[in-house]
Amino acid sequence: MPDVLCREMREDEAAAACAFTESIFGPLPLDYWLKEPRYTAAVSYLDGELAGVIPLSLRRFQLAPGVVAETAWENAVGTRADLRGQGVGSRMIAAARDFLADRCDLLCVYRGAERSDGYRFYADRTGHIDLAYVPFYRLASPSGSRPSGFDSLAHGEVPARGAELAKLFNSQWAEWGGFVAREPGYYDWAIDHIIYGRIPTERRLHLLTEAGQTTGFAITGVRQGARADGTCYVLDFAAAEGDPRRAGLLLQGVVSVAAEAGCPLVWPHAQRGALATLLEAAGFERGQRRMMLMGLPLRPSRLFGLLAAARGGCEVTLDVWTSTTDFRLWDAGPTAPRCTLEMKDRELALLLTSRLDGRQALEEERITLAGPAAAARVEPVLARLLRCTPWHHPYLEYI
């Protein structure tokens, strides 16, 4: 293994790191890096020269209702051609785990192609766990006309309407997880973030208006230039209160937009829920899972604390034992009952991100209990705190 130095990128290294990434993955304007509100990178050096870069976008990510974690998203992981396969990427990720430990709860990455070396790098070598799968629903030949009250605007209108769009989004998706929290300034960033520097995309905002009130919106995108694929993608979508009638009108409007453009419509969405049912009823075909969200917990105790704070607290002291580590997950005080949770690292990651049901995991013995506290006292606490939350991941946030 080469003797590389791996650490966090310094501010004055951004231009060189961006140029290095461009040399591997193609155009990435520096101004897109610099305008990201919370952005850094892991870098590696060999003999004073850049040997690898992992750009990192820091985002506040909703895991479940009331549970928002600090996350860092890896993208465009690049290593110098003559050093690939020699552990440089793994060492950069190890460095990122260290320098992010005081500010991030979870290290995440988008992946696909589960049989590829790229996927196995994360699954087998760095410890990332599949957290969610995002199937792409496809309508090959859209047809139909726009419903009354459905209008299209340029994407430049999005920031001025950000508060309104965030309110609509939360009215439909607040009980889900899997998305960057719709906090003030979200749409200023999301509509023009770094992916649109790498993949130029014609974005449009579509509004549903009833009795003078905006009751739904969608954002669509069509890729341009070298990455053009002749497809209209749904990037974001919400109907007020998740109302099925309004969702149906929005769906009709979005289908008509693709029909006007004469191109197929692709809608990345979860495998369950009312919207999935609506898409299938409209003739969309669900494709194989081509995209997944992977994650690696950096601060397990803080993640558990977020769950406990949102779900009524935890009155049991909990230790964790896995095949690779053991630690105190939660300290409820010196007189509290104590229990050790035994499981694999995969189950731990899923529990802490609200992607695994604790009661079911206990019944299936994916979690076992040890220690002095009686199971009858511990299991109800775990069932209350460790619940599975459905995830909805808008394609607008893809990086």
Image (cartoon, rainbow, N blue to C red):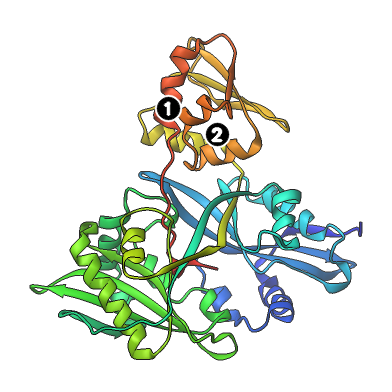
* Residue 380 horizontal side relative to residue 3, left or right: left
* Residue 62 horizontal side relative to residue 241, left or right: right
Neighbours of disc 2 within 10 Å: few (<14), some (14-19), many (20+): some
Does the residue at mark 1 contact the one at mark 2 (Cβ under 8 Å)? no
Label 1, label 2: how many angstroms apart (C-alpha)? 18 Å
- Residue at the (54%, 59%) spot, across then down: 58
Looking at numbered disc 2 in the image, what kind of residue is underneath it?
A: Ser
Under circle 2, the secondary element is helix
Q: Work out whether residue 161 can be spotted.
A: no
Q: State which tag comes first along the sequence, 1 or 2.
A: 2
Residue 225 picture location, percent across and down: 56, 91
Q: Work out whether residue 377 can be spotted.
A: yes
Under circle 1, the secondary element is helix
Asked whether 249 or 59 is in front, the reply is 249
Looking at numbered disc 1 in the image, what kind of residue is underneath it?
A: Ala
Mark number, residue 383: 1
Neighbours of disc 1 within 10 Å: few (<14), some (14-19), many (20+): some
Asked whether 59 or 154 is in front, the reply is 154
Residue 43 picture location, percent across and down: 74, 63
* Residue 96 horizontal side relative to residue 32, left or right: right
Quarter assignment of residue 115? bottom right
Q: Nearer the viewer, mark 1 or mark 2?
A: 1
- Residue at the (82%, 60%) spot, across then down: 88
Asked whether 154 or 143 is in front, the reply is 143
Identify whether 15 is placed above or below 134.
below
Residue at the disc numbered 2: 301
Identify whether 308 is placed above or below 315.
below
Residue 333 picture location, percent across and down: 49, 16
Image quadrant occupied by the C terminus: bottom right
Residue 205 picture location, percent across and down: 32, 79
Asked whether 271 or 2 is in front, the reply is 271
